[in-house]
Amino acid sequence: MAAYIKKHFLLALMVLFLLVVSSYARFNMMVTKGDIESICNKENINHSLCFEILKPTLEITKLDFSGLANFLINYQSRNTSDTLKQIKMFEGNTTGADLKAVQLCEELYDDSLFHSDRALKVLATKDYDSLNIEVGFTLAYMDTCNDGLSTMKPTPQVIITKNSEISSMSSILRKSILFPPS
């Protein structure tokens, strides 16, 4: 009985080792045009935004999956920062309950930038589970922000659109890095 358990335990350890090694190996593979097409055509991805961000430029074609994650996090962070500036300008022209919604978005955008910085740090350590969590924060923050903004009259459609784009960038990041094409 002990030999049976030992044999199966060793087999399980070998399978686990192979899974870990293969998952780390994919991050060292160069991203191909076919990979980009596969990522951008996945379900629940904003296809046009994905192809716009990941169009096969010289910069993109030189990246491995880890480099692509870094590129996407930085791209998303720049967009988040730019939209936060718009929110702060919008805040000056808002009062009452609408002001609270805008202030909540401002706070969520600050938090999103914090988690983008953390995402870069965990990516550098190859902690992909934590990367998934950090990216997930931005998805949740953009949804929460949109919920508050959608109650405003008039609805700030420009900011809602930017929130949706930033959320889509998180989805692209998750689908390309955490669940890359096989």
Image: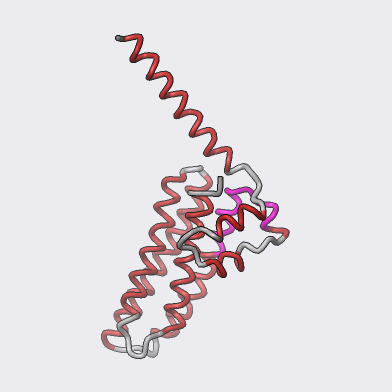
In the displayed structure, 33 sits above or below 89; it is above
Quadrant housing residue 28: top right
Q: How is the image coloured?
A: secondary structure
Quadrant housing residue 88: bottom left
Judged left or right of residue 95, residue 88 is right
At horizontal 32% and vertical 75% (from top left) the residue drawn is 147
Q: Residue 1 versus residue 146: which sits nearer the camera?
A: 1
Range of magenta residues: 60-75
Judged left or right of residue 61, residue 8 is left
- Farthest left residue in view: 97
Predominant SS of the magenta segment: helix
Q: Residue 53 versus residue 37: which sits nearer the camera?
A: 37
Q: Position of residue 65 (x, y in %)?
A: 59, 49
Reply yes or no: does residue 64 show up in magenta.
yes
Quadrant housing residue 5: top left
At horizontal 57% and vertical 48% (from top left) the residue drawn is 66
Q: Quadrant of the C terminus?
A: top right
In the displayed structure, 166 sits above or below 152; it is above
Q: Position of residue 45 (x, y in %)?
A: 49, 63
Reply yes or no: does residue 70 show up in magenta.
yes
At horizontal 48% and vertical 78% (from top left) the residue drawn is 85
Tally the marks. 0
Q: Position of residue 150 (x, y in %)?
A: 34, 81
At horizontal 53% and vertical 33% (from top left) the residue drawn is 21
